[in-house]
């Protein structure tokens, strides 16, 4: 099947090319993101393969359908960027799960780096500065960690942190029976905010979780709390977070996602002027660590994404039932 692959990055291409040896799709890789201007690249293909920041709005999907695209294959779990109610004869498939260990381990990396300041120590030592001033951390052992969301990623993160000797609290709309097995205790969200030294977000972005971290909820937290978000940027009201950092209410922030990341992440902007003043303000704090939506970026996760995406396309081509189809409701 001919596939137009948008937002192509070298690290993904390597995995798709290798695994495609046993699928034999004809993949054309395009660096630009999918939008109304770039949709034309899909001419001659039957499938469009897209990622988190590609534009799957109705006008773009209409263009794709007109060009002969019959299936849109998301190479990610989320599908909030695709309009599922267009009424077009277009299937949408996705990768519902790939290594949750990748994201959980990155979450713990953010916690450890922020706490022990290894990113700052690395730079100091390379410049011959062996001063330890400002590098004091704390023992994770005995600290309370609050997991907002105890699904696949939240549970593994909790398991790793319980290995450090942390007390684990959790809040979830649908409690996970495995959570108690790793020593976790479910509480109300209010108690989780009140009791936790570290709060880690692992809920999807929904109407209920949009800006769940805001001035009001931050006010309920311990002074000096560490907030970690590897889930979705819009879970946090960034302006409220900046205010809380400025008045030392929040002690540490680790983010792999940011609410306005679509215009920033996944691109090399090192020769550009960044116009997002809120993001720039965030970067000025010594106790804020931002990574560019890379928590998923492991060999195992990239293998899983490529394998499932290629299988989704093969199943579509063969007219088989689509196990990973996303339908509008
Ligand atoms: P999951 O579906 O296994 O777990 C999500 C949990 O959140 C479920 O237990 C669910 O009951 C709970 N939940 C839903 N609404 C809630 C609410 N209002 N309050 C409390 N809990 C709620 O999902 P998984 O695989 O653990 O992924 C979690 C999130 O991680 C994803 O939604 C995605 O946004 C993010 N993610 C980030 C990646 C990255 O590279 N930074 C990569 C993959 C996922």
Image: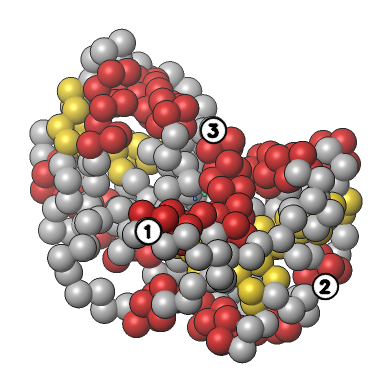
Q: CA distance from mark 1 to mark 3?
A: 39 Å
Closest to the camera, between mark 3 and mark 2, is 2
User: Within 10 angstroms of label 3, few (less than 14), some, or many (20 or more) residues?
Assistant: some
Q: CA distance from mark 1 to mark 2?
A: 41 Å
Q: CA distance from mark 3 to mark 2?
A: 31 Å
Work out whether mark 1 precedes mark 2 in sequence or the reverse, and give the earlier one: 1
The residue lying toward the viewer, choosing from 48 and 241, is 241
**Residue 188's spot in the image, x, y percent?**
86, 65
Work out whether mark 3 precedes mark 2 in sequence or the reverse, and give the earlier one: 3
| Residue 230 shows in the view | no
Q: Residue at x 25, y 74 (%)?
A: 274
User: Within 10 angstroms of label 1, few (less than 14), some, or many (20 or more) residues?
Assistant: few
Mark 3 and mark 1 in contact (Cβ < 8 Å)? no
Q: Residue at x 31, y 26 (%)?
A: 15
Residue wearing tag 2:
194
Mark 2 Cβ inside 8 Å of ligand 1: no
The circle on residue 128 is 1
Work out whether mark 1 precedes mark 3 in sequence or the reverse, and give the earlier one: 3
- Specify whether 36 is left or right of 309: left
The residue lying toward the viewer, choosing from 251 and 265, is 251
| Residue 213 shows in the view | yes
Q: Residue at x 37, y 28 (%)?
A: 306
Q: How is the image coloured?
A: secondary structure
Q: Residue at x 83, y 38 (%)?
A: 182
**Residue 297's spot in the image, x, y percent?**
42, 40
Residue wearing tag 3:
99
- Specify whether 114 is left or right of 144: left
- Specify whether 145 is left or right of 68: right
Q: Is residue 239 above or below residue 81?
A: below
Q: Secondary structure at mark 1?
A: loop
Q: Is residue 100 above or below residue 258?
A: above
């Amino acid at each position: 099947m001919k596939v137009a692959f948008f937002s192509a990055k070298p690290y993904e291409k390597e995995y798709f090319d290798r695994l495609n040896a046993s699928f034999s799709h004809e993949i054309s890789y395009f660096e630009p993101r999918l939008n109304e201007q770039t949709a034309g690249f899909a001419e001659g293909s039957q499938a469009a393969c897209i990622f988190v920041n590609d534009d799957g709005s109705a006008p773009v999907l209409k263009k794709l359908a007109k060009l002969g695209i019959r299936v849109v294959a998301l190479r990610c779990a989320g599908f909030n960027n695709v309009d599922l109610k267009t009424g077009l004869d277009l299937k949408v498939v996705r990768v519902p799960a790939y290594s949750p260990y990748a994201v959980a381990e990155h979450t713990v990396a953010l916690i450890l780096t922020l706490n022990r300041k290894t990113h700052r120590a690395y730079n100091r030592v390379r410049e011959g500065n062996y001063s330890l001033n400002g590098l004091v951390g704390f023992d994770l052992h005995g600290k309370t960690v609050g997991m907002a969301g105890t699904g696949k990623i939240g549970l593994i993160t909790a398991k790793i942190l319980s290995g450090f000797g942390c007390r684990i609290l959790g809040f979830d709309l649908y409690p996970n029976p495995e959570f108690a097995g790793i020593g976790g205790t479910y509480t109300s969200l209010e108690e989780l905010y009140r009791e936790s030294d570290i709060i880690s977000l692992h809920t999807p972005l929904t109407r209920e979780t949009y800006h769940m971290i805001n001035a009001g909820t931050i006010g309920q937290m311990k002074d000096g709390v560490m907030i970690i978000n590897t889930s979705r940027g819009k879970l946090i009201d960034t302006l409220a977070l900046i205010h809380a950092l400025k008045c030392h209410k929040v002690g540490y922030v680790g983010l792999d996602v940011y609410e306005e990341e679509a215009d920033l992440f996944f691109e090399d902007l090192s020769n550009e002027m960044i116009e997002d003043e809120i993001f720039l303000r965030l970067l000025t704090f010594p106790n804020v660590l931002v990574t560019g939506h890379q928590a998923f970026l492991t060999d195992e996760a990239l293998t899983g994404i490529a394998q499932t995406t290629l299988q989704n396309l093969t199943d579509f081509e063969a007219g088989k039932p689509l196990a990973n189809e996303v339908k509008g409701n």
